[in-house]
Amino acid sequence: MTTNNRVLKALALLVSILALTMALGACTSDDEPDPTPTSAPDTQAPAATAAPSDDGGGDAAPAPTPTAAMMMEEAPYGGIPNFSTRADPPLGWDVSRSGTISILMPGGSIFGMGNMIRQCWDDGAAICPGIATEWSASDDRMSWTFTLRDNVYWHDGVKLTAADVKFWLDLMVFGVTVGQDSRRPANWDFVPWVESVEAPNDLTVVINLKSAVFDFDQLLAVDNQLIQHPRHLMQPEIDAGNVNVTPLDVGLIGLGPFYLQEYRPGSVIEVRRFDQYYMTDENGNQLPYLDGIDFYITPDQSGMDTAFRTGRLDATARGGGFQLTPEREEAILSSFSPGEVTIVEMGQSSFIPLAFNSIRESPVKDVRVRRAIHLWLDREELIQVTFGGFAKRVGMFDPDTLWATPGLMDTPGWSTETKAADREQAKALLAEAGYPDGFDLEYMCRRLWVHMCEPVAGQLEALGISVDLQLVDDATRASRILEGSFDMQHGGATVALPSQYYSTIASVSTNAAAGPKHDDPKVDEFFVRLAAAATIEERVEIAREMEVYFAVENVYSAPLYTENTHTVIRDYVKGMQVPVDNYRRNLDFATVWLDK
């Protein structure tokens, strides 16, 4: 069992290119935090490994990001900070139905991040142990074996076994049907490849695949794929016909470092330290350090900012609409003396697009209309109006990563230099498609994203398109995406690797939950090719081909931008494992401590 050294090195390059400035974890509250601490929590079993390398050799799996707490002789236990979360978790807190930060911000602390394996704290492209300590693939990459820890407990005291993991995997991969009622599988990228799951003993899980997938562990390790469906509580519900039972229905019993003490919708989510949590730091100290966390639900960003400035919050929320703009950031910083607060910057690692429904009878069924919209949109203007500049233009992939097509940001649609000519071409394409005077168009927008959608609608009105902007809640949006009952909708998934885009852009025939609606089998073929690609070089070539085909030639989605996340925490909040590549990671808060 060895780490795929060449894969990890190449993926480390990806993350290093994506990396944004961040600083947390200082030993004192008066100095600037040190972004490169020198010791790490030992949360791994000794022989933790990732996928075998192409040549049969490799290095050990990388250690998680360290915290300043590890330098102390005694663990810094105690304290209950107040963190902000932007909304009540939707859809029964079920991440198999929505990976929103509104679930993950409080839910990561209850359920833990990842599942059998997880993205490493300091490198989202590397893989670290979760409840599994070791894993390996067969030579043909058709079977993957995981060895579980023997000390993992649900919050109600029931010990986790391989049978519990098999139950969870079966539910996520195959769904379930009882009588006339069915639960659909999860919309996750590892799901389509699974043929069967075995639990030969209490500590071993074997996943058999339909075909070879060289980066299957990367697909499985994505942090928002949480084990939050306890077999001993959910199986009776399912047997009774409640196939869509949610974590909320069974009391939010998880495996994470904190258990739920109280949830008052619209007010607060209180979690408290779980003494049987399975992870320790490098000195053998039990995690987590905090006694608990109170997550205050703050649906108004100005109210959140005020609560932080007046001392009622120790950290602001992550997520679209609540991450700081330059003006809000300056207002907060002007309220404090140097050293009292820290601005935290995190990337998003994926594209936010306009996703078109090209199989519904509407003008956007015509590729010329989709190309016209792509050419017309002024992305730089959108970035300034929406984020105050805290974002950048992207294609399907961040242009600063190895996956992106070189020079794509200098081509029509994205280029700032050719915008006037692009807009003339957009008008010509609409006339050619039979819409010289424009048309009516539905634009579905998540309520939390109204600040993103209104500027887009304004630009499209200038093109002659009469936009019906429809603001919906998360549950309605998820349902309408499944049904395909929209012309165009705003949004995408926070993913980083090309093979993870299946859940976002695959055809309606294979993935009804994908945001854009098309029935193009060639898009699905890209994912088959990516799965079979044994080297980074092959995947890069396929990814760039897919980006051009999907976003330029066919414009099934019009990529707009990726946001640069800014949040703020009080300087006495230490040990925050801040992801530089994806703000939805590292939300279990197991290593956080208070220096006061």
Image (spheres, rainbow, N blue to C red):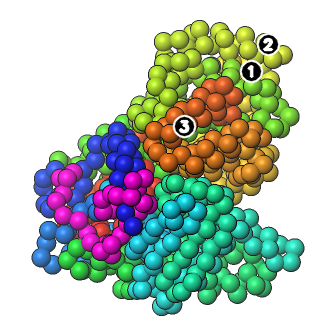
Of the two numbered discs 3 and 1 in the rendering, the one whose residue sits closer to the viewer:
3
Amino acid type at image mark 2: Glu
Q: For mark 1, what is the residue? A: 368
Q: State which quadrant residue 425 falls in.
A: top right
Which span of residues is magenta-colored?
Answer: 34-61
Toward which corner of the image does residue 252 lie, by quadrant? bottom right
Badge 2 or badge 1: first in the primary sequence: 1
Give the mark nearer the N terminus: 3 vs 1: 1
**Residue 356's spot in the image, x, y percent?**
71, 36
Left or right of residue 248: residue 121: left
Residue contact between numbered discs 3 and 1, judged by CB atoms under 8 Å: no
Q: Quadrant of the C terminus?
A: bottom left
Asked whether residue 396 is in view, the answer is: no
Q: Which residue is mark 2?
A: 432
Q: Residue at x 70, y 87 (%)?
A: 236
Q: Nearer the viewer, residue 18 or 384?
A: 18
Direction from residue 518 to residue 549 in the image, left or right: left
Residue 277 x/y as whole percent? 38, 81
Circles 2 and 1: CB distance less than 8 Å? yes
For the residues labelled 3 and 1, the Cα–Cα distance comes to: 24 Å
Q: Which residue does the numbered mark 3 point to in the structure image?
A: 543
Query: Is residue 402 magenta-colored?
Result: no
Q: Is the residue marked by circle 3 packed among few (<14), some (14-19), or many (20+) residues within 10 Å?
A: many
Label 3 amino acid?
Ala
